[in-house]
């Protein structure tokens, strides 16, 4: 893909930069192009870190990069804080009692910082806070940096640039950590995100922290608003949900690409059939997994082959062994995933890993041979983990076994072969479909969080957006009331943006 003028400006801008990237604007494509350019132009020993929220996102960045990334860090937020700060420098910051091989278990919950630190000294295990709005890992990492000059010098000597993706999902502790890196250690940051796509305020994400960086004097800022995914009518609707993008509205004469169907609980499926194209990819997005699964079952009963694709249990594993479970699941479920892909997924891997290919292949083949027996399967996965220097926990092993032995979770790994899917809108983030079906009752639009959710859901659609409006539904009534208020700020009504049928 050629870069647009705005994307070229982002790639060529030096120093601290924050990019506000609306949905469908080519955020990942642009970030990868910038990473590749800056790696190639670097003339010293220093490296970059590309930090994401998920193993899946980190893998996508690796796959898209066409430059040698050996020695560079491409991984998750937590893995960066743990592997680059906590494990190597906690002893220097807090003393010899922390000189141990640390593991992570986020099911361990601490009420306060001192309790978490004491647990590490006694058990060599990192946990998390009981309060989801607080982040023990990043609070610990920042305190270590402030206490350890060696840690500060290490990061300054190693990294010339740190790239952070989906910054709107960072919580307070993460934001303080990253701002310390640039404000105090003078490490350049490239930050990309979109507060309109923040889905995780319930677990502490602070989109206002992202917006706050836009006003920092040591950051340049660039806005990406050109949506290459959705057609103009869908862009118009989604842009009008927020004041800062409402100026992008461009009146269209045809309103055929967004249809609002006024339905009953009994006739919504029949009405969809008049507008849904079986030959195009589609997704039905609901707020809850239960509603998504139920909708998929009902649609299948009426000859519409939708498959429910929930988030797999292993996707909630965020400790340092999480990559291994995900890699094993892909090896077992994805035909094109080989031992070479497995080697590629080893964190901070090098070319040396290819020397253990035959041993890895034997371990993986033994795991495959024992999928029928959960106890044997868990034992063989643990053997592989030990071989690679990782620990396992029974609950994580159970999550892996549940993932690879349950049809609805398997669907999420072979989703490229599934034309019509039902899932939550949280799971749809980062995906795109020709047609998207939404129930307006899922978006009461009483607060910005609901608008964020609605924005993410609507911007998954490329060419067709179908709203299901169930009559006499409380959530539906709230949607109408609040969308009217928001659109009214631009002097528009729902009728001027969508085709409404009864």
Image (cartoon, rainbow, N blue to C red):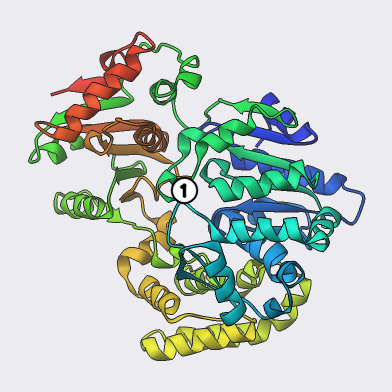
**Image quarter of residue 12:** top right
- The image position of residue 122, as x and y in percent, is 58, 81
Q: Which residue: 46% across, 40% down?
A: 198
Q: Which residue: 19% across, 55% down?
A: 297
- Count the marks: 1
Q: Secondary structure at mark 1?
A: loop
Residue 337 visible? no
Residue 448 lies left or right of residue 326; in this view the side is left
Q: Is 150 or 370 nearer to us in this picture?
A: 150
- The image position of residue 401, as x and y in percent, is 39, 77
- Whether 167 is drawn above or below 301: the answer is above
Q: Which residue: 40% across, 35% down?
A: 452
Residue 269 lies left or right of residue 112; in this view the side is left
- The image position of residue 139, as x and y in percent, is 60, 56
Badge 1 density bin: few <14, some 14–19, many ≥20, Cα 10 Å: some
Residue 234 visible? yes
> In the current view of this chain or complex, which residue is farthest to the top?
491
> In the current view of this chain or complex, which residue is farthest to the right?
43
- Whether 390 is drawn above or below 458: the answer is below
Q: Quadrant of the N terminus?
A: top right
**Image quarter of residue 70:** bottom right
Q: Is 102 or 109 nearer to us in this picture?
A: 109
**Residue at which label 1 appears:** 204
Residue 265 lies left or right of residue 99; in this view the side is left
Q: Is 442 or 319 nearer to us in this picture?
A: 319
- The image position of residue 126, as x and y in percent, is 56, 71
Q: Quadrant of the C terminus?
A: top left
- Whether 463 is drawn above or below 148: the answer is above
């Amino acid at each position: 893909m050629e870069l647009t003028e705005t994307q070229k400006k982002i790639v060529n801008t030096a120093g601290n930069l924050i990019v506000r990237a609306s949905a469908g604007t080519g955020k990942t494509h642009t970030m990868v192009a910038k990473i590749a350019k800056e790696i190639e132009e670097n003339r010293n020993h220093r490296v970059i870190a590309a930090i994401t929220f998920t193993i899946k996102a980190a893998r996508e960045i690796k796959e898209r990069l066409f430059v040698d990334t050996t020695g560079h860090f491409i991984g998750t937020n937590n893995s960066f804080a743990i592997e680059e700060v906590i494990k190597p420098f906690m002893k220097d910051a807090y003393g010899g009692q922390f000189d141990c091989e640390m593991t992570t278990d986020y099911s361990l919950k601490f009420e306060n910082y001192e309790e978490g630190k004491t647990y590490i000294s006694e058990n060599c295990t990192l946990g998390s806070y009981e309060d989801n709005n607080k982040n023990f890992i990043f609070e610990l990492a920042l305190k270590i940096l402030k206490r350890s000059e060696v840690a500060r010098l290490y990061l300054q000597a190693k990294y010339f640039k740190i790239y952070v993706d989906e910054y709107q999902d960072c919580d307070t502790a993460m934001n303080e950590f990253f701002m310390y890196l640039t404000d105090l250690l003078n490490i350049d940051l490239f930050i990309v995100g979109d507060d309109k796509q923040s889905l995780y305020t319930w677990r502490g994400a602070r989109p206002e922290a992202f917006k706050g960086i836009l006003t920092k004097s040591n950051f340049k800022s660039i806005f990406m608003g050109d949506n290459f995914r959705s057609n103009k009518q869908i862009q118009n609707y989604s842009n009008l949900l927020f004041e800062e993008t409402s100026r992008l509205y461009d009146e269209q004469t045809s309103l055929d690409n967004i249809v609002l169907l006024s339905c009953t609980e009994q006739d919504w499926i029949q009405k969809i059939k008049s507008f849904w194209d079986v030959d195009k990819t589609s997704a039905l997005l609901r707020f809850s997994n239960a509603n998504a699964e139920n909708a998929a079952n009902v649609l299948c009963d009426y000859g519409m082959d939708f498959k429910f694709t929930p988030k797999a249990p292993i996707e909630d594993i965020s400790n340092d062994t999480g990559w291994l479970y995900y890699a094993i699941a892909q090896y077992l479920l994805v035909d094109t995933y080989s031992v070479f892909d497995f080697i590629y997924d080893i964190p901070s891997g090098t070319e040396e890993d290819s020397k253990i290919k035959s041993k890895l292949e034997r371990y993986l083949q033994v795991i495959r041979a024992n999928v029928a027996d959960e106890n044997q399967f868990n034992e063989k996965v643990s053997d592989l983990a030990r071989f690679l220097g990782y620990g396992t926990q029974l609950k994580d092993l159970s999550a892996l076994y549940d993932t690879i032995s349950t049809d609805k979770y398997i669907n999420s790994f072979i989703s490229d072969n599934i034309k019509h899917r039902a899932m939550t809108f949280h799971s749809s983030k980062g995906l795109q479909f020709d047609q998207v079906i939404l129930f307006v009752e899922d978006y009461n639009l009483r607060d910005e969080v609901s608008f964020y959710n609605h924005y993410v859901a609507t911007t998954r659609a490329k060419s067709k957006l179908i709203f299901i409006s169930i009559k006499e539904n409380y959530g539906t009534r709230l949607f109408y009331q609040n969308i009217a208020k928001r659109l009214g700020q631009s002097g528009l009504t729902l009728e001027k943006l969508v085709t409404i049928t009864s």
